[in-house]
């Protein structure tokens, strides 16, 4: 809610899907055909839709999980309750769910081998819970080009949720690899909520101001592909070169080849510099053509899971002491690599 009302934005990107979430949602839908999407997305939309419509803020979200149609129907019902009939255009992106096609693929000799072990899919075929292709920005871009104000997808890439609005606004060609890579890296930096704004930082966490009210990151982009990472004023956390670097290497394999359906982004080309307090400029990004194949996320039953919970309490567990960060800002301001 604060991202919408805390200052001017044009797009709100909402990322709901971890890999394990797809199998959980598939189990939910197997028990209830109307389930299988992020249920907390619907009450959130009920809160923010009036403001989004009034301020022309467009939303991209992969909250559809394994039931994009069901999610969209729930949002449509909320819009009607809010009196927004005729004022809201929904865009749906489907096609990522390939469960019905798995046997066809196997019959055609497409083995879908495990990326880590090399084992063929046939070895676990009878235990599969979900199978989804990672779609990129292209279908979301089409929805935005057709006037959708809220775009709901299933298993789309986290980065595509940010890249699609940039391509739409700036008219970037799908083979403009440097700009597509820049938009992809922008999406990677902000994909995990407040991680790049203080939630996942190499400094001792008590030095970061007001994490209890941490601000979520914002991308301010321009047509040439450069962008600034910032956050709303008067929010907790911070945006610094170290906090952005920490997120850049999050879930990173080969930094020369960050592979997405849209491009291959070279993270070794990223350059960072301060543009002011809580403002880090990102530039110099280079990219290469996308691969000819898509990644598929497949989950299967593999036994049982035990979960334990450890509860602890101590003076700083629920609050952080505000501490001047001038020393940290000055220390990092010379680091632009």
Image (cartoon, grey):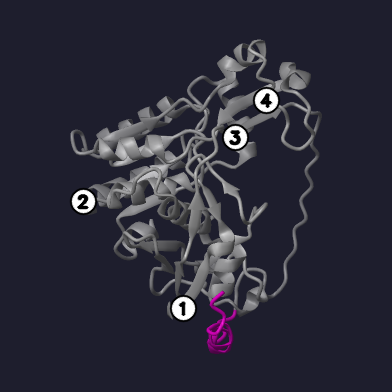
Asked if residue 34 lies in the magenta stretch, the reply is: no
Mark 4 to mark 1: distance in Å? 44 Å
- From the viewer's perspective, is 286 left or right of 125? left
Name above or below for residue 136 compared with residue 332: above
Name the residue at 41% across, 62% down.
218
Q: In which quarter of the image is residue 223?
A: bottom left
Residue marked by disc 3: 295
Q: Where is residue 19 in the image (x, y as percent from the top left)?
A: 62, 39
Tell me the quadrant of the picture where the C terminus can be found: bottom right
Name above or below for residue 255 compared with residue 41: below
Residue marked by disc 4: 112
Q: In which quarter of the image is residue 314?
A: bottom right
Residue marked by disc 1: 274
Q: Is mark 4 on a helix, strand or loop?
A: loop
| Magenta segment boundaries in residue numbering | 321-337
Name the residue at 29% across, 48% down.
171
Q: Is residue 78 visible?
A: no
Q: Is mark 3 on a helix, strand or loop?
A: loop
Of mark 2 and mark 4, the one earlier in the sequence is: 2
Name above or below for residue 41 compared with residue 312: above
Q: Position of residue 317 (x, y in %)?
A: 67, 69
Q: Is mark 2 on a helix, strand or loop?
A: helix
């Amino acid at each position: 809610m604060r991202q919408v009302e805390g200052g001017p934005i044009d797009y709100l990107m909402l990322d709901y899907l971890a890999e394990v979430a797809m199998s959980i949602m598939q189990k939910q839908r197997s028990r209830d055909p109307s389930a299988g999407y992020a249920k907390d997305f619907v009450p959130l939309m009920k809160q923010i839709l009036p403001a989004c419509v009034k301020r022309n803020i467009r939303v991209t979200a992969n909250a559809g999980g394994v039931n994009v149609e069901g999610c969209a129907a729930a949002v449509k019902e909320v819009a009607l309750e809010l009196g927004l009939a005729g004022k809201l255009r929904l865009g749906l992106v489907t096609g990522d769910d390939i469960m019905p096609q798995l046997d066809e693929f196997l019959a055609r000799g497409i083995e879908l081998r495990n990326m880590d072990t090399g084992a063929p899919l046939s070895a676990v075929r009878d235990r599969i819970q979900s199978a989804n292709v990672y779609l990129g920005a292209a279908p979301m871009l089409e929805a935005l080009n057709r006037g959708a104000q809220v775009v709901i997808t299933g298993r789309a890439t986290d980065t595509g949720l940010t890249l699609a609005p940039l391509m739409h606004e700036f008219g970037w060609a799908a083979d403009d690899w440097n700009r597509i890579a820049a938009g992809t890296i922008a999406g990677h930096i902000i994909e995990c909520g407040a991680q790049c704004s203080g939630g996942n930082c190499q400094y001792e966490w008590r030095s970061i101001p007001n994490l209890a009210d941490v601000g979520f990151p914002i991308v301010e982009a321009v047509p040439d592909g450069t962008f600034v990472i910032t956050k709303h004023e008067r929010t907790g956390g911070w945006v610094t070169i170290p906090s952005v670097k920490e997120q850049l290497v999050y879930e990173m394999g080969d930094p020369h080849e960050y592979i997405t359906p849209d491009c291959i982004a070279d993270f070794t080309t990223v350059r960072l510099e301060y543009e002011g307090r809580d403002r880090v400029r990102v530039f110099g990004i280079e990219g290469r053509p996308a691969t000819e194949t898509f990644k598929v996320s497949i989950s299967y039953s593999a036994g049982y899971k035990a979960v334990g919970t450890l509860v602890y309490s101590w003076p700083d567990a629920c609050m952080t002491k505000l501490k001047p960060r001038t020393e940290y800002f000055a220390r990092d301001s010379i680091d632009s690599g």
